[in-house]
């Protein structure tokens, strides 16, 4: 966490039960990836169509009742929203409040890492009607310049009301028409705004003070960066029902900034609208309610990341004039860079190396397919599952009379990867359960299958997911001839590579008897068996099944297999870990259930079962009741708000005899040796069994080879070393002493070195970092990027020098003594100089000078010859000089900044290949490109265009006159005179004025108002005696 920028996220929850209504409860946001200490953005909605409801969020350390009485939603599915920021505690938790558990919903929109937020809930009444008025916020602890969240609410039940808020002294006049709050409560909207002055004032507006109210929800005491107020209205998407790109950069919003936008909906139908960053997989859209009175709108505010080209994505499922509404009220920029780890000695570095592996437990998400008989795509991002993770999916058949094929596979797979699960006994609400693992794609999607007659008779639930791993699915079945004993079985023929951890499904197909089966590693002495129930009179081909992980051995990927009945039991190879979560230890140890039923209780797995702390355990949970179902669950000890419970069927329909155990499996994080278990029925009818555990790799853990002493991590590299080595990525290294990190480089040396990326180094003493450069040095040096001498840092630049220099980027410099920094500039100097940014010429100087940013250099006066030496009246050069000095002063001191916008520089995309026939990207990734992507998908670097564009601009000073009277003298008609602006500046700028595609006039107020113009006439040289200046005429676009 170095940069305080916004991270879009996803996660939804509601109060799980009625007994906890009307009280503050804790919720863990870390399950959605929110780090401790962040400021989370939460959308709170009333989804009930009957009554207003109280809903709110606050920090866990808070004591204020920070909630809003949100009006009812209009007829389903439209909802009413309010957005709040909230400080996350050190454990990733917040407090939330809902008046009635079935009506208030909470949606995580994103979070700001590294920031501090002061929460308030102060309300104040407006006084003026239909006019802007000031209001001081210093009484609530707000200081000058702080960014505050202001809540506007309309409580009138039959009329909409226009309301607004802005920085004190701002010229922004836009208002928001909040619809009526039918049947009570408030129609709310929260907007960020900057306080101003010694009393931290803002300005507010309402057309009905009696029925509207304002409130302070909080403010950033330590903000992410700089907030700039603006107002820009954007058009709705050109097509409904799909995400589309929206260009916000052309309206003045900065690339890589964070926009604060309002989405609104009115008229007589609800709308599903949303905003998200480019190429996001999060379905960040929401159902907004509508106004029954055909006036006003309901709104939702949210932050959204702008990409490097100035684009975001927008969504609407309707298309109609002026509906819905997308409005930007400001943006964040100049983000603060927190250097959280200052170091002055050795530190380890891991870049895309052997992974940080995490298993994340989640609340079950029902993803049952809507259509049966075919594979259907499901989106698991709404439950917080990360893209490209490996999900743990429980499938269940709850049909009381028919079996069903249920399965899960990767998106785009062609495998028929399903099992025929038993029907569930009548009148028990049972489910026959099996657990699958599946690799999710870039959009957190997979495919599910059900052959059931009724879609509602299926359960498909996600109980957790792995990040930092790679799982390869398979589906092959086999039987063994031997029964009642362990036998070797080779898996190489099924596509399982040597040395992998494989997932095997053990199946009992008997229609009359329970049988035991199991798998284990070759050489193991564990009797690793589970007792599976039979089908008991049902039709054949149904199975009772359980998955187990097992380590393969030898060149044929061999495992050992056991079947109590060879004819009734079969085994399936359903997948293996290409990049495993860690080292897997096989177990078969019983965990004794505690007597208490219906409650979560802690179990000490370290003391009772020798399972160490910090691992991820693989647990089988079983019901041995023959006539009643059971509710079972397992979770980590710090996840008390995650209800990972599963209803599991009885083992048989009637109480005739004991018939084995019905199992399902799940992973769980072991913290300090503890986990929590839950069982609804008695302990004697419940079985918990540990099948093994993963000692997961974190922050570079892994197995190294080909070295004779300590080594940490090697990824796609080969090392031959006789001493300590750290990390190699896609490179080959030959060293005889300590070396740290090499990526895609080759190096041969005899002393300690640090980091090389895409570089070759030949030297004899200490050197640190080289990126895409070749270096020949004989003394200590630090960092070089495409540079060539003994200096500190060079990026894409060349330097000839004989003394110490610091940093040059994209510049060429020739000088003979100490210099500091040049960026995009050229300089020929013989004395000290400091910094030049975006210089456009060659500067010849022989003395000290400092820094010019968008400034000017005085133009020298030119001594003009006398044109008529015989004239009676001679106009002296001094008079011409006086005239020029005064005009120069007018331009330089009273002129306004004008930004010339030229055609951008196009360069081939370094990330994908270009199609010269269709003039776009081929969708083929270039190896070693900056942002890898799958073949055939849109290149994330150039957005599929096949090239990148670099904006080219230049800021100059001009005297500006709008609608000038002399326009007609230059063949500009009277009818066109409105919207015409005249620029007067130096003739030296004429070439750039002609080249400019457009010009942004009055550039200093671009954040509030963008006046973009195009050339109509000129430039026309003007001046006394000599053409020192030029005028040009431009038309407002």
Image (tube, helix red, strand yellow):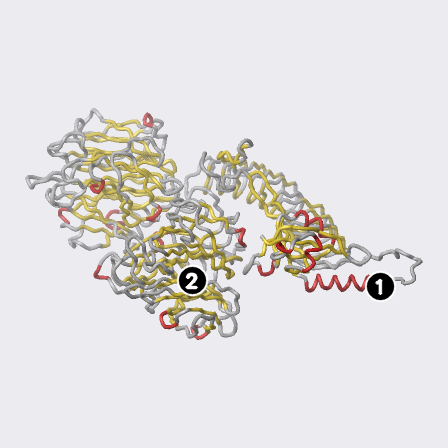
Q: Which mark is residue 209?
A: none
| Front residue of 248 and 414 | 248
Q: Is residue 522 above or below residue 92?
A: above
| Front residue of 480 and 856 | 856
Distance Cα–Cα, label 1 vs label 2? 60 Å
Decide if residue 834 is in sight here.
no
Q: Are marks 1 and 2 in contact (CB under 8 Å)?
A: no
- Report helix, strand or loop for mark 2: strand
- Left or right: residue 768 compared with residue 382: right
Residue found at x 78% / y 61% = 884
Residue that sits furthest to the left in the current view:
656
Decide if residue 69 is in sight here.
yes
Number of residue marks: 2
Which residue is label 2 attached to? 176
Residue 734's image quarter? top right
Q: Position of residue 155 (x, y in %)?
A: 34, 67
Q: Is residue 558 above or below residue 299?
A: above
Q: Position of residue 315 (x, y in %)?
A: 41, 48
- Left or right: residue 723 compared with residue 61: right
Residue 70's image quarter? bottom left
Who comes first in sequence, dot 1 or dot 2?
2
Residue that sits furthest to the right in the current view:
870
Which residue is label 1 attached to? 878
Q: Is residue 889 above or below residue 537?
A: below
Q: Position of residue 184 (x, y in %)?
A: 29, 66
- Report helix, strand or loop for mark 1: helix
**Nearest-to-viewer mark from 1 and 2:** 2
| Front residue of 478 and 673 | 478
| Front residue of 18 and 89 | 18
Q: Position of residue 1012 (x, y in %)?
A: 59, 54
């Amino acid at each position: 966490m170095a940069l305080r920028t916004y991270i879009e996220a996803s996660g939804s929850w509601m109060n799980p039960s009625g007994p906890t209504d009307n009280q503050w409860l804790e919720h863990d946001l870390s399950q959605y990836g929110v780090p401790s200490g962040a400021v989370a953005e939460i959308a709170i909605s009333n989804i009930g169509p009957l009554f207003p409801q109280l809903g709110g969020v606050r920090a866990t350390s808070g004591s204020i009742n920070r909630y809003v009485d949100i009006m009812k939603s209009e007829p389903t599915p439209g909802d009413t929203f309010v957005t709040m920021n909230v400080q996350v505690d050190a454990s990733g938790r917040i407090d939330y409040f809902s008046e009635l558990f079935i009506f208030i919903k909470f949606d995580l929109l994103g979070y700001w890492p590294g920031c501090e937020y002061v929460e308030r809930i102060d309300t104040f009444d407006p006084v003026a009607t239909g006019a802007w008025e000031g209001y001081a916020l210093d009484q609530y602890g707000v200081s000058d310049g702080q960014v505050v969240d202001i809540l506007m609410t309309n409580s009138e039940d039959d009329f909409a009301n226009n309301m607004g808020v802005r920085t004190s002294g701002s010229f922004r006049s836009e208002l928001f028409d909040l619809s009526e709050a039918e049947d009570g409560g408030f129609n709310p909207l929260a907007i960020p705004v900057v306080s101003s002055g010694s009393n931290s004032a803002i300005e507010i507006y309402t057309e009905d003070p009696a029925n509207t109210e304002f409130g302070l929800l909080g403010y950033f005491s330590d903000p992410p960066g700089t907030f700039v107020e603006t107002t820009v209205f954007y058009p709705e998407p050109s097509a409904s029902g799909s995400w589309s790109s929206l260009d916000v950069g052309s309206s003045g919003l900065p690339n890589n900034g964070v926009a604060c936008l309002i989405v609104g909906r009115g008229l007589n139908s609800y709308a599903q609208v949303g905003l998200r960053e480019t190429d996001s997989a999060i379905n960040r859209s929401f159902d907004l309610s509508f106004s029954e009175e055909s006036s006003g709108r309901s709104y939702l505010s949210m932050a959204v990341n702008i990409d490097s080209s100035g684009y975001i994505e927008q969504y609407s499922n309707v298309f109609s004039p002026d509906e819905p509404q997308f409005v930007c009220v400001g943006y964040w920029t100049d983000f603060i860079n927190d250097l959280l780890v200052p170091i002055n000695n050795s530190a380890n570095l891991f870049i895309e190396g052997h992974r940080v592996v995490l298993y994340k437990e989640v609340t079950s998400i029902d993803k049952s397919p809507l259509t049966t008989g075919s594979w259907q795509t499901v989106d698991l991002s709404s439950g917080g599952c990360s893209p490209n993770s490996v999900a743990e999916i429980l499938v269940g058949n709850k049909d009381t009379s028919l079996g069903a094929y249920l399965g899960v596979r990767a998106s785009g797979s062609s495998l028929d990867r399903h099992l025929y699960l038993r029907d569930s006994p009548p009148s028990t609400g049972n489910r026959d359960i099996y657990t699958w693992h599946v690799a999710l794609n870039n959009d957190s999607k997979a495919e599910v299958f059900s052959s059931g007659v009724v879609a509602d008779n299926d359960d498909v639930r996600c109980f957790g997911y792995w990040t930092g791993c790679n799982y390869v699915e398979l589906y092959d079945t086999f039987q063994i001839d031997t029964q009642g004993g362990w036998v070797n079985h080779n898996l190489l023929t099924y596509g399982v590579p040597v040395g992998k951890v494989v997932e095997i499904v053990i199946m009992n197909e008997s229609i009359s008897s329970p049988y035991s089966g199991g798998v284990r590693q070759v050489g193991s002495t564990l009797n690793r068996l589970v007792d599976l129930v039979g089908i008991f009179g049902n039709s054949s081909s149904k199975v009772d099944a359980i998955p187990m992980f097992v380590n393969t051995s030898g060149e044929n990927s061999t495992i050992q297999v056991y079947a109590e009945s060879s004819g009734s039991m079969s085994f399936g190879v359903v997948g293996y870990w290409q990049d495993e979560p860690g080292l897997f230890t096989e177990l078969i140890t019983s965990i004794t259930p505690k007597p208490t039923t219906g409650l979560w209780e802690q179990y000490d797995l370290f003391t009772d079962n020798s399972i160490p702390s910090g691992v991820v355990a693989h647990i089988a949970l079983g019901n041995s009741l023959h006539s009643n179902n059971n509710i079972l669950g397992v979770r980590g000890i710090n996840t008390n708000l995650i209800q990972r419970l599963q209803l599991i069927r009885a083992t048989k329909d009637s109480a005739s005899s004991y018939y084995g155990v019905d199992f399902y499996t799940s992973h769980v994080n072991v913290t300090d040796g503890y986990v929590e278990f839950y069982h609804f029925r008695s302990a004697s009818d419940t079985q918990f069994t540990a099948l093994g555990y993963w000692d997961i790799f974190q922050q570079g853990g892994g197995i190294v080879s080909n070295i004779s002493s300590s080594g940490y991590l090697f990824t796609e590299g080969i090392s031959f070393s006789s001493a300590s080595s750290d990390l190699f990525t896609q490179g080959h290294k030959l060293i005889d002493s300590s070396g740290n990190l090499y990526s895609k480089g080759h190096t041969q040396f005899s002393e300690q070195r640090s980091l090389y990326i895409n570089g070759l180094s030949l030297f004899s003493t200490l050197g640190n970092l080289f990126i895409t450069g070749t270096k020949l040095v004989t003394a200590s040096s630090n960092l070089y990027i495409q540079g060539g001498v003994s200096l500190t840092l060079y990026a894409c630049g060349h330097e000839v020098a004989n003394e110490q220099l610091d940093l040059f980027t994209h510049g060429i410099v020739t000088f003979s003594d100490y210099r500091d920094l040049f960026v995009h500039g050229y300089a020929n100097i013989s004395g000290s100089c400091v910094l030049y940014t975006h210089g456009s010429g060659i500067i010849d100087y022989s003395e000290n000078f400092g820094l010019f940013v968008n400034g000017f250099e005085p133009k020298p006066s030119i001594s003009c010859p006398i044109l008529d030496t015989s004239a009676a009246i001679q106009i002296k050069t001094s008079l011409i000089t006086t005239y020029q000095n005064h005009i120069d002063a007018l331009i330089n001191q009273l002129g306004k900044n004008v930004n010339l916008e030229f055609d951008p520089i196009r360069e081939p995309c370094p990330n994908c290949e270009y199609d010269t026939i269709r003039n776009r990207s081929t969708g083929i990734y270039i190896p070693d490109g900056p942002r890898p992507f799958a073949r055939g998908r849109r290149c994330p670097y150039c957005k599929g265009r096949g090239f990148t564009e670099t904006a080219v601009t230049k800021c100059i000073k001009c005297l500006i006159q709008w609608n000038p009277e002399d326009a007609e003298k230059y063949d500009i008609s009277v009818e066109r005179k409105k919207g015409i602006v005249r620029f007067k500046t130096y003739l030296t700028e004429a070439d750039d004025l002609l080249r400019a595609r457009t010009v942004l006039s009055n550039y200093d107020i671009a954040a509030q108002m963008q006046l973009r113009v195009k050339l109509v006439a000129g430039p026309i040289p003007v001046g006394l005696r000599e053409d020192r200046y030029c005028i040009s005429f431009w038309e407002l676009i």
